[in-house]
Image: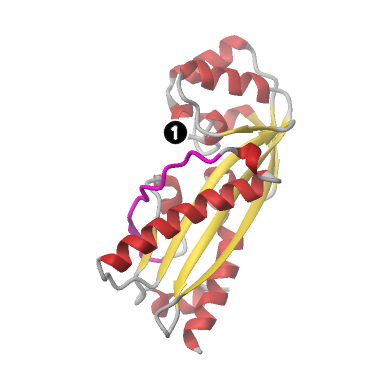
Amino acid sequence: MIIQFLNELNKKNIILASSSPRRKEIIEKLGIAIQVLPSTFEENLDPKDFSSPGNYVIETAKGKTREIAGRVSAEQKPIDLIIGADTCVALGGNIFGKPKDDKDAFQMLKKLGGKSHEVITGVHLMAKKSDNTWHESEFSEVTTVKFASLTDELIQSYVNTKEPMDKAGGYGIQGIGGSLIEGIDGDYYNVMGFPLHRFTSYLLSIFEMWKM
């Protein structure tokens, strides 16, 4: 995989277009040094305008990376790779992003309780080519999560911890929310917000392009 090229990769200027501490933590597990530069892209796309949740999150991720690309180009910053990502939860035709408030978080969790749902992360990558233009690539990853049955009292107690408030679907698998989950099928890190294994395969392709 990418492990044998870490020294060369760490000579590159890599930007994560997100303020998510979880995405930064996941990518840094590879031993790659990244800069965090949150995008100012307004995340107001309507999921109903897209044929699938995967296309919706990819388009949001693309908006983040392209905003950063325009900004760093205007400032003439030496950037080699920009990483953008967006995550949503899907159940029965409904798309859940981050809850707006405690009431919204409660309603999300009540709908998820006792059911299996999908966590979808879209990733968009912009890599600088030798001719100073951008090579763009994108993908989405799906993980199925099975929730235990949840009582209203349990849901409210969890909402009161405030852990749900900055997370798609209103829960964090890496925190207390992990106790609500019976099992998953797919990439654990995808549920946290970034599909690490799939990303490394795309990163390897980008690295091979840089070597040409």
Q: Is residue 147 left or right of residue 35?
A: right
Image coordinates for residue 28, horizontal then vertical, percent = 42, 59
Q: Is residue 10 left or right of residue 95?
A: left
Q: Is residue 118 left or right of residue 42?
A: right
Instruction: Say left or right for 111 vs 155.
Output: right
- For residue 145, above or below residue 189: above
Above or below, 169 against 129 in this view is: above
Q: Nearer the viewer, residue 18 or 201?
A: 18
The three-letter code of the residue at mark 1 reads Asp
Residue 72 picture quarter: bottom left
Residue at image x 52%, y 22%? 105
Task: Give the main secondary structure, helix, strand or loop, of the magenta stretch.
Answer: loop
* Residue 87 showing in the rendered view: yes
Q: Secondary structure at mark 1?
A: helix
> In percent of the image, x 32 and y 60: which residue is there?
71
Point 37% across, 58% down: residue: 68
Image coloring type? secondary structure
The N terminus, quarter of image: bottom right
Callout count: 1
Q: Which residue is mark 1?
A: 166
Which region shows up in magenta? Answer: 31-45
Identified at 64% across, 18% down, the residue is 110
Q: Is residue 44 magenta?
A: yes
In x, y percent, where is residue 58?
A: 58, 52
Q: Position of residue 137 (x, y in %)?
A: 56, 67
